[in-house]
Amino acid sequence: MGQNIVLLGFMGTGKTVVGKELARCLRYRYIDTDSIIVTMANKSIPRIFAEDGEPHFRDLETRATECVVQLRRHVIATGGGIVMRDKNLANLRRAGPLVCLEAIPNVIYQRTHSNTYRPLLRTPNPLRMIKQLLDQRTAQYAKADVHIDTSYLTVSEVVEQVLAALDRLARQRGQKHFLLDKNKTR
Ligand code: S3P
């Protein structure tokens, strides 16, 4: 089992809010690949998309996955499209178990529609775009080790489920429990 926890999942599935709470509970640090990209490019995600295009953003995203492999005791949240390159998944797998957060399209829409910082959802029909992108990405998300549907759960319920699922995963792999009780501060 790697030294970090990696959160995958579509936009609006709760990676940021769950990741921060998970990190707090475990006394891990929180980091997300979008912030690494913003630092590397020295501009916001919408500006990268607008000025440099999505392919450039995806290249920076791959570089971000190369950076996080070095980390220890971090919860690493990732951008929703990071799964589309197998190379990214391979890098992230080296960093730690892959936990995919999921949600149904309507919930994703409700959670994202008032935000303007996601260039891919700035379209006349965001719900249709959400469904299209989910169709394209589902097979890649399926490659995660653990899947949690966050649609109707609170943040702390998701955190509980993630920890329980990681413990089960560690046991299946014949490893010691993923987390030692003394690390849990809940
Ligand atoms: C994207 C998701 C975003 C961000 C970028 C592209 C995607 O991250 O990386 O806007 O392709 O799904 P979040 O999933 O954190 O919103």
Image (cartoon, grey):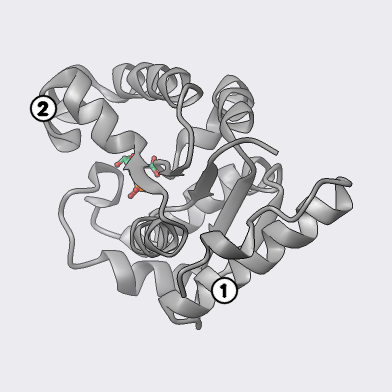
Question: Of helix, strand and loop, which one carries label 1?
Answer: helix
Cβ atoms under marks 1 and 2 closer than 8 Å: no
Q: Name the residue under label 2.
A: 43
Circle 1: residue type: Glu
Q: Name the residue under label 1.
A: 160
Q: Position of residue 103 (x, y in %)?
A: 52, 68
Q: Position of residue 53 (x, y in %)?
A: 25, 22
Q: In this view, does 172 lie to the left or right of 100?
A: right
- Specify the quadrant of the image occupied by residue 64: top left
What crowding class fits label 1: few (fewer than 14 Cα within 10 Å), some (14-19), or many (20 or more)?
Answer: few
Looking at the image, residue 184 lies above or below residue 11: below
Q: Is mark 1 within 8 Å of ligand 1?
A: no
Q: Where is residue 62 in the image (x, y as percent from the top left)?
A: 44, 20
Q: 182 or 107, which lies in front? A: 182
Residue depicted at x 47% and y 34%: 82
Looking at the image, residue 131 lies above or below residue 109: above
Residue depicted at x 34% and y 56%: 16
